[in-house]
Amino acid sequence: MKNFSGHSKYLWGILLFLFPGITTFAQSTLYQSPCSELIWQDEFDGTELDSDKWSPQIGDGCPSLCGWGNDEAQYYTDRPENIKVENGKLIITSLKEEYEGKSYTSARLRTIHKGDFTFGRIEARIKLPEGVGSWAAFWLLPTDDVYGTWAASGEIDIMEYQGKNPGEVSGTIHYGGAWPDNKYKGAVHHLPTGQYYHSDFHVYAIEWDSTEIRWYMDDKHYATRTKEEIAPLHWPFDQRFHIILNNAIGGHLGGTINDSHFPMTMEVDYVRVYSSPLNRSIIGEKKALKNSIVSYYIPSDISDVSYTWTVPSGTAIISGQGTDSITVQWGDTDGDITLELERNCDIFTLSLPVKLYADDCHLIFNDYDNQINIDYKSSSGSFQSGYTNPFPTAGNSSAKIARYTRRTTPKDSIIFGNLIPQDYAEFETGERSFYMDIYTVGKPGTIIDLELRNQELYTMGTGTRSTFRAYTSKQNEWETLKFELLSVNDPDIKVDQYVFFIDPDYINNENTSQRRYHIDNFRRGKVASVDITGNDSPDCQKQNETYSVTPNAGSSYSWSVPNGATIVSGQNTSSITVDWGTTSGYITLTETNSDGCEDIAAQLMVSLVGCPTAVKHTSESLGIKLYPNPFHNKLILESKLKNLDIRIINNLGENVLNESLNETYKEIDLSTYPDGIYFIQLRSGDIVVYEKIIKGN
C-alpha cells in the first residue's frame, strides 16, 4: 500500500473549511482529524482491475443512449488494450481503430453497487491524456435516480478535461428537471501559462455535504455550489452517488478529433473517499421576529458527544441546553446561535447567523429602496429589481421599484424565498393581510394570485398551504392591492416560498407594454372591519354624493374613485364628497391609525344608473372570471360583485336558466343541457356583461 502521510493534507483542508474552530485532543503524525475515516480506496497496486470495486461499461450507448447522449465517437471495451493496472497505476488507453462499427476505442469504469457514497471528500490523483479530441472525466452519477431521469437526480463532475484546452479543467453540477429541462452550474480552473494537465499528476477533489459542494485542484479551492444557490429548483445531491472514470473521444465537449495524437493515455494513481467527520449544520430559522420563540437543532444520530449552546446577549435558552435541540426566546439583538460539540476525538464549533425583524403591523417584505428582506428566486418572465420608478406620484413616490414583464402563456409566476417566518393562520383567519402596490397599463380586473408554498413538498406534488387573490382595478395609475383568502389546502405546511401568479389563466392577450407590471411595497398589515357608507347606485353624473367611514382619532385616510369621478372634498379625512362621471366602479379607502399599525382597506362598488348605453363593461374589466370555457358540466363564476343576476341563453335566443349570485363564487350546473354555444348575461344594477360560453370539448 502507498504511504498516506503525503496526501493527508487534503483531508485537513476539508476539516479547516467546514470547522475553522477545530482543535484536536492529541497530536497526530497525520494531519487529519482522528474523527475522520478513509472509507473506500483503490491504490491500483495489483496487476489487474479490482472487480470488487469497478465495473467496466461496454459499448457505444446504443440502442437507448447512442453516443452516450453526447455524440461521442468511441466504443468502450474491457480489453487489456484499453484497461491495464501496472506499476501502481490504472491506465486507460484510447486507440484509433475500427471496432464494432466505431473508429475509436476507450474505457469507462464505474463503482455502482460496489462503491456508493453520500457526502465526504472524494479525490483522485490523475495524469490526463495528451491529444485533441480527448474528453477525460472523473465524475459521479446517482445510483438510484430517486428524483427521476437525468438530470433530475443530479450529476457531479469532479473533473472534466478537454484535450483541445490542455491548461484547464472544470467542475460542474447538473440538476433541474429531466432532459431537456435540465440545468447546470460550473467553474473552470486554469494552470499558469505554459503548463498543461497532461504533463504531470494532479489531485482533483470535491468536498460534499448536505448543503454544498466544493471543488479543489491540488488542494486549491476554486469553486462552490450551494443548495440555496439553485433554489427553488430541487437539490438532488442528498442521495448516494457512484464514481466514474473515463476518457471519451470527440462528442459535445471533446470536439474535433486529431487522429495523429493517438494513442492517448489517462493514468490514475489512486482514488480515495473520506467520510466527513461531522457532516452537520445547525437547523432552524435564519430570520426571526423580535421576541419570538424559535427552536434550533442538529441531527441526533451522533454518539458519544456533549453539546454546549450559546446565544446572543438578550436572548434566553428556554430549554434544551446540553442536548441536540434548544428552544430560545429571542430579544431585540441579532447574532449567532453557536454550538460546541465535544467528541472523544475532537471539538467542533458550528454557528448559524440569525437576523431579527420587528413584529410590527407594517412589516415590509420588499420595498426595493432600503428593505429587501426576502429574496427573488426565479420567474417565468423578466423581473428587474431596483428599477427606477417611471411614474412617481402621490400614489407611490418611491425612487426604486421592481418591474416585471409576464410571458404570454398561462401559469406565469414570480417566486420569492428566504422568507421572514410568519403566523400564516392570522392571514387565513383575516387578522392580517398581504398588500402590494402596483402600476400597469394592462386591463383592470386582472387576477393576481399569491400562493404560500413549501418548495420541497411542491416538487413531490403537494406543498401549497393557502392561496390569496387580488384584482387590479386601475390602469396607468398606482394602486394598492389587498389580497383576500381564496383557499386553504393544508394549514400544517411550513411555508418557505411566496409565488405570485399574474393573470394565471392568461385571458388578457395584451401587447408587451400591457403585460408589464410595476410592483412595490410588498408588505403585511393588520386588518380591521370597516364599511364605507353612501349611495351605491346614484344617477349618472350625480354630484355631491357623500361617502364615509366611522372616524378613528389619529387615523389618516386615503381615498380613490373610478376614472371620470372627482373627489370634490374630504381627501385625507373619514368622509368625502364625490362628483360622478359616467363610469361605474369601486370607491377604495386605506386607513392608517395613529400608531401606524392598522392598514385598513375598504371598498364599495358603485353602479351608476341611467348612463349612456355606450358605456360597456367586460368580465375582465370588472374582475369577473368564468371558467373553464369551454366546459363540460359545470361553469364556475367568480366575481367581486355580489347580488349578480345570472341569465343563460342558448343559440336560439331561448332563456334556459335564471339564477342569482350572492357570494363571490358559484358553480353553475349545466349538465342536463346539450353541448353547444350559449350566452351568459350578468347584471348588477346598471352594469350588464355579456359573454359567450361553450359547452362541450
Image (tube, grey):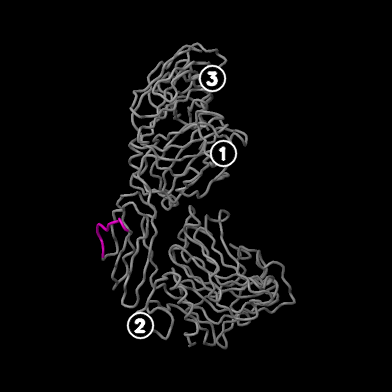
Seen in the picture, residue 229 relative to 85 is either above or below; the reply is above
Which residue position is annotated with label 1?
Answer: 389
Label 2 element class? loop
Indicate the amino acid at tag 3.
Gly
Q: Nearer the viewer, mark 2 or mark 1?
A: 1
Cα–Cα gap, marks 2 and 1: 62 Å
In magenta, the rendered stretch is: 313-321
Residue 689 rendering spot, x and y as whole percentages? 51, 20
Q: Residues within 10 Å of mark 3 (few under 14, many from 20)?
A: few
Q: Amino acid at mark 2?
A: Ala
Q: Which residue is mark 2?
A: 26
Q: In the rendered structure, does residue 314 fall within the stretch colored magenta? A: yes
* Residue 507 showing in the rendered view: yes
Q: Earlier in the sequence, mark 1 or mark 3?
A: 1
Q: Relative to residue 674, is residue 642 drawn left or right? A: left
Distance of label 3 from label 2 (alpha carbons)? 83 Å
